[in-house]
Image (cartoon, rainbow, N blue to C red):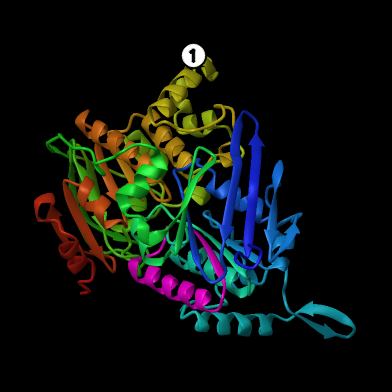
Amino acid sequence: MSEEYILRMENITKHFPGVVALDNVSLYVRPGTVHALMGENGAGKSTLMKCLFGIYHPDCGKIIFKGKEVKFRDTKDALESGISMIHQELSNVPQRTVSQNLWLGREPLRKNSGVHLIDHKRMEQDTDILLKRLDMIIDPKVNMDVLSIAEQQSCEIAKAVSYGASVVVMDEPTSSLSEREVDHLFKIIRDLRSNGVAIIYISHRMSEIFQIADEVTVMRDGAKIGTYPAPELNEDKLINLMIGRVTTQRFPEIVSEPGDVCLQVDHLTSSNSSSFKDISFDLRRSEILGIGGLVGAQRTELVESIFGLRSVTTGKIRVRGKDIIIRSPHDAIKNGIGLITEDRRGAGIFPLLSVTMNTAIASLEYYRNKIRLIKHKEIDKKTIELNSMLHTKTPSMSTQIQNLSGGNQQKVIVSRWLMTLPDILIMDEPTRGIDVGAKYEIYTIMAELVKQGKSIIMVSSEMPELIGMSHRIVVLCNGRLTGILYNKDATQEAVMRLATKFS
C-alpha cells in the first residue's frame, strides 16, 4: 500500500465546539491521478484538507505522505514537504504586486554590501517565466487589487504550481473562471498529472468531475461515504451519494408571472471608460432577470453601479417610475434594493462577527427603540427564523461566520438581505461555491420571493442556472448589451452567440 499511494489520511477525526467536523475519515490518493473530493457544504471536505495542510491539527488519526508519517505544524511545514493548496477563498495581499504575492515568504535574495536584500528584478523575471509557462497573460508588476477575481484566482493557481509539490489540493479552483479559463486549468492539471503529481480536486460543478477525475471520494456530514472510480459514476448517482436521497429536479418551478416595470435602467454608462457603456433594460415585478456573459463582460460592474458602489457618467435609474439618484449603497437600500456580492470573502462577510450580526448588519436601523438602542431579542428571533428557512448549518448563531463552510456563509448573506425586506434583490453569482443541495434551497427561496412580488436580478456564469432560473436574460459582451432573450428562446447556444458578439 505504501508504494501504491502517495498520500494516506487514516481515521482523521476533528471536533469544533458543538460539532464533529470529521468523524473517522480516511482518504487514499495515488500519484499521477486526480482524486475528486465531493460532498455538500459542511460535509467536511475543506476541513479534511486543512488538516492535511497544517491549518488544523486532527484530534486523532494519522497522515502518511510518501511512506512516512507526518505531523505538519503549519502550512509552511506542509509546503516545504511537498504539499500545496489553492484555497476556496482568495488569500492574496491586495496592495502588493503579482510577483510579490507569488513569492511571499520565499523571496529571492541578493547580497549588497554584506546585507541580503530582496531581488525584485529576479522575482519579476521568475514570475514572468512561470506565467508564460502556464499561458497566463498577467503583468507581474501590477497590484493584485487591480486584477479581476478570475485573474486573482489564476495567480493562486500559478502560486500553487510554483512550489513544485507532489500533491496539489485545489479547493473550488474554477469558481471564478470562465469556460475558456477552466479548459486552460484542465490543461495544467493534465500536465501535472503526467509528471506524477497527485491532484486532490474539490468542486461543486459536476461536469468538471467527469472531465478530469480518476477517482471520487464522497463525504456527508463529516463522514466518508465511499471512494469510487469516476467512470462508474454519473451525475444522478453522485448527487444521491452526496445528499443521501434521490433528487430528480435541479430547478424549482417558478409560477410567478412578471408584472409591471419596477426598475428601469436607461443608457447607463460607467465613469470607467473601459467598463460598460449605454446599457438599457427594465425589470418587472415578480421577475427573475438573468444577466449573462463571459468573464470581462462587465456584469458585476453594472450591478454594482446600480447599487451605488461604482459611479456612472450618464444614464438614469428609475424605481417604480420615479427617477432616483444612487450615490451610495445607503441610497440603494433606502429605495428597496439589496445586493449579494460576487466576492463573498472580500466584500460579503465580516469574518470575526457572529452569524447573528452578519445577518442583521444591514438592518440594524430597523431594529432600534425610541432611544436608539438595538432590540437584540427581535434581532435574535428574526435571524434564527431566516437562517432556519435557508437551512444554514452552524453550531450556534453566536459562531463566528469565518468558521462556517463557504456555502453556509453564502446562506447567511442571503439571509442578511432578506432581512432588509428589499423589493429588488440583486444576486451576483448567488450559488458560487455552493453544493447541489444548497443550490436548490436558494433557488426555492428565489422562486418564493418572486411569488411574493419581489424582483430579482441574477448575475450567473453557470449556463444551466441562468437558463433554468430566469424569465428573461440580458446578455453583455465587452461592456455592451448584445441582446435580451426570453426564457422560451434561451438556449446555451443562443446565450453564447450573444456573449461573444463583439461590436
Identified at 24% across, 35% down, the residue is 447
Q: Is residue 151 left or right of residue 16?
A: left
Relative to the observer, which residue lies in front, 57 or 86? 57
Q: Position of residue 201 (x, y in %)?
A: 49, 60
The amino acid at mark 1 is Lys
Asked if one can make out residue 428 in the rendered structure from this viewpoint, the answer is no
Region rendered in magenta: 175-201
Q: Is residue 180 left or right of residue 62?
A: left
Q: Position of residue 360 (x, y in %)?
A: 48, 29
Identified at 52% across, 83% down, the residue is 133
Q: Position of residue 129 (x, y in %)?
A: 57, 85
Determine the image quadrant of residue 96.
bottom right
Identified at 62% across, 28% down, the residue is 18
The residue that label 1 is drawn on is 370
Q: Is residue 249 magenta?
A: no
Q: Is residue 247 left or right of residue 92?
A: left
Q: Is residue 183 magenta?
A: yes
Q: Is the residue 450 above or below the residue 312 in the image? A: above
Secondary structure beneath disc 1? loop
As drawn, the residue found furthest toward the left would be 488
Asked if one can make out residue 473 in the rendered structure from this viewpoint, the answer is yes
As drawn, the residue found furthest toward the right would be 114
Indicate the quadrant containing the C terminus: top left, top right, bottom left or bottom right: bottom left
Relative to the observer, which residue lies in front, 19 or 134? 19
Q: Position of residue 489 (x, y in %)?
A: 9, 56
Identified at 65% across, 36% down, the residue is 15
Q: Is the residue 14 above or below the residue 475 in the image? A: above
Determine the image quadrant of residue 229.
bottom left
